[in-house]
Image: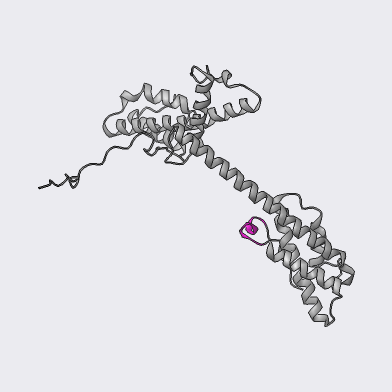
Amino acid sequence: MATKGRGTRRGASKPPLTREFRPAQRLGELDPRSLTRRLYELHAAARPGGLDDWPGDGDLWRVLGYTQLYAGALRGEDAMEAAERRVMLVQWIREQADALQLRAIEDGRAAGARWARFTDPLCVGSEQGAYQRARRLAAAVHGEATDRRSPEAARAVEDRRVREELELRRAEHADEDRFEQVHAAAVALLAHADQLPLDVGDDNELHDLAQVLDICRTSRQRASLRAYLNLAVTAVREAADESGEPLPTPARQAVDDAGRAARHTSGPRDDQGGQPPARDPR
């Protein structure tokens, strides 16, 4: 009779994850002064005479040296907590150093430096070693919480940054296209101002549109142009309804085109400064 295969025992531990798949742990957002202030409190309690020689909460390196020098003055739970705070502070500095070192490498490369210039500073033996070290720094600085400093993680981070850059460029191009549509519609609407029931010289929405049309330089100003155009179209249509007189065909076409441009370019980015100031009702 055939024997049955041995199944996995219930409750048996799973095999440990390899380094490539263990989640990376990082402190992330942390105020280092909160650590140094707590270290001051712990040492002040252990030395009632005062800490006149305390280096100051902002001098992280000197705080680490000071608390190491006088670590023996603490006892029990205070001593253990102080050691924990010192470890966290060093870890925070290490994480900040990664970003600073990566930026220095990127600045040097942008200036034309070859990888050979970084072999000694990075303590590696070849240009390839310097390149790989930079890639792993990028994975640590720009990666997700699950990324490791491995070639696989570095490639994943690079791919993700390329995708994010492409998405950003697509969004910028889409914003530029939307602005061009709105700008062209606003110019066409103002070109028929003499056929509209609002006088562009008066203090009204059409006048506001003409004022902002030529000063749209920043992204915030460009975003607001759509809102100004929408208000102008609404005001023109309301004035036409009140007058009871139909608009001439070219002017009506310009108003309709402007209305479509204002509607079709609306989106989630309009809340980034895309609203003009409200006008006083008259």
Q: Is residue 251 magenta?
A: no
Labels in figure, total? 0
Query: Farthest residue in the bottom direction?
Result: 244
Location of residue 206 in the rendering, given as x and y in whole percent from the top left corner? 81, 66
Q: Compared with residue 60, is residue 197 higher up or lower down, i.e. above or below?
A: below
Q: Compared with residue 191, is residue 139 higher up or lower down, i.e. above or below?
A: above
**Where's the C terminus, which quadrant?**
bottom right
Q: Name the side, left or right, on which 120 lies relative to 242.
A: left
Residue at the image position 70 percent from the left and 51 percent from the top: 219
Location of residue 220 in the rendering, given as x and y in whole percent from the top left corner? 69, 53
Out of 5 and 98, give the one closest to the viewer. 5
Residue at the image position 26 percent from the left and 41 percent from the top: 14
* Residue 174 visible from this viewpoint: yes
Residue at the image position 18 percent from the left and 47 percent from the top: 10
Q: Name the side, left or right, on which 242 lies relative to 70.
A: right
Question: Which of the 4 quarters of the picture holds residue 75?
Answer: top left
Question: Which of the 4 quarters of the picture holds residue 100?
Answer: top right
Q: Name the side, left or right, on which 6 lies relative to 209.
A: left
* Residue 54 visible from this viewpoint: no
The residue stretch that appears in magenta = 266-273
Location of residue 24 in the rendering, given as x and y in whole percent from the top left corner? 40, 37
